[in-house]
Image (spheres, rainbow, N blue to C red):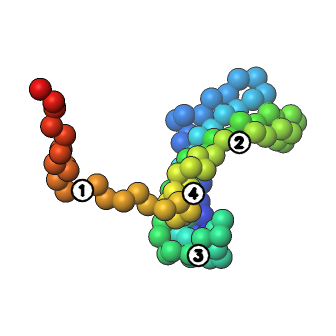
C-alpha cells in the first residue's frame, strides 16, 4: 500500500510515567503487491491499530501493538463473502400433527 497512513487519535492518547498508549486509524489503497496472497483490488482498506510504548531517554525502548487484523483481512478480500439471504423467507412446509 504505497499510500499507507496512520492517523493517530491524539485526543485518545494516554500517558502515565514512562508509558504511552495511542490509537490510530490506518488507511491505504491496495494497489501494490498481493496482500496475504490476495491480488490488489485498488480499494481503500481501513482498520484500527493501537500502540503501547515505554520511553527512556527520549527514545522508545519497548513497544507492544494491537491491530484489528480481522477487519484488514475482510477488507483485503481474504475471506469469501457470505451469500445474500433470500429476499423472502422460505415457506414452512411443517404441518403439526393433531
Left or right, 64 with reference to 48: right
Q: Nearer the viewer, mark 2 or mark 1?
A: 1
Q: If you read the primary sequence from the N terminus, does the residue marked by circle 1 or circle 3 appear first?
A: 3
Write down the residue under mark 4: 73
Regarding residue 47, the answer to whether it shows in the image is no
Label placed on residue 98: none
Q: Which of marks 2 and 3 is nearer the N terminus?
A: 3
Point out the frontmost of discs 4 and 1. Answer: 1
Label 1 neighbour load within 10 Å: few <14, some 14-19, many 20+? few
Tell me which corner region of the image, top left, top right, bottom left or bottom right, holds residue 97. Answer: top left
Foreground label between 2 and 3: 3
What SS does tag 2 mark?
Answer: strand
Q: Distance between the residues labelled 4 and 2?
A: 17 Å
In the rendered structure, find residue 86 and report the number of the disc placed on it. 1
Residue at mark 1 to residue at mark 3: CA–CA distance: 30 Å
Instruction: Give the numbered dot on residue 39.
Output: 3
Residue shown at 86% from the left, 39% from the top: 61
User: Could you tell me residue 6's position as x and y percent?
Assistant: 59, 54
Where residue 30 sits: x, y (%)? 55, 70
Label whose residue precedes the other's in the sequence (4 or 1): 4
- Give the Cα distance between marks 2 and 1: 41 Å
| Distance CA(mark 2)–CA(mark 3) | 26 Å
Distance from Cα at disc 4 to Cα at disc 1: 26 Å
Which residue position holds label 2? 65
Give yes or no for contact between labels 4 and 1 (Cβ–Cβ under 8 Å).
no
Sequence-first disc among 3 and 4:
3
Q: CA–CA distance between discs 3 and 4?
A: 12 Å
Q: Which residue is drawn at 71% across and 36% down?
A: 52
| Lower position in the chain sequence, tag 4 or tag 2 | 2
For image coordinates 52% across by 35% down, the residue present is 11
**The residue tagged with tag 4: helix, strand or loop?**
helix
> Contact, CB < 8 Å: mark 3 with mark 4?
no
Amino acid at each position: 500500500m504505497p499510500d499507507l497512513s496512520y492517523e493517530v487519535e491524539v485526543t485518545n492518547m494516554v500517558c502515565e510515567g514512562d508509558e504511552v498508549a495511542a490509537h490510530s486509524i490506518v488507511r491505504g489503497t491496495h494497489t501494490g503487491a498481493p496482500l496475504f496472497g490476495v491480488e490488489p483490488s485498488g480499494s481503500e482498506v481501513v482498520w484500527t491499530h493501537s500502540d503501547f510504548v515505554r520511553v527512556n531517554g527520549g527514545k522508545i525502548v519497548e513497544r507492544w501493538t494491537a491491530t484489528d487484523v480481522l477487519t484488514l483481512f475482510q477488507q483485503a478480500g481474504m475471506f469469501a463473502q457470505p451469500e445474500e439471504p433470500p429476499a423472502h423467507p422460505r415457506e414452512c412446509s411443517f404441518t403439526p400433527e393433531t
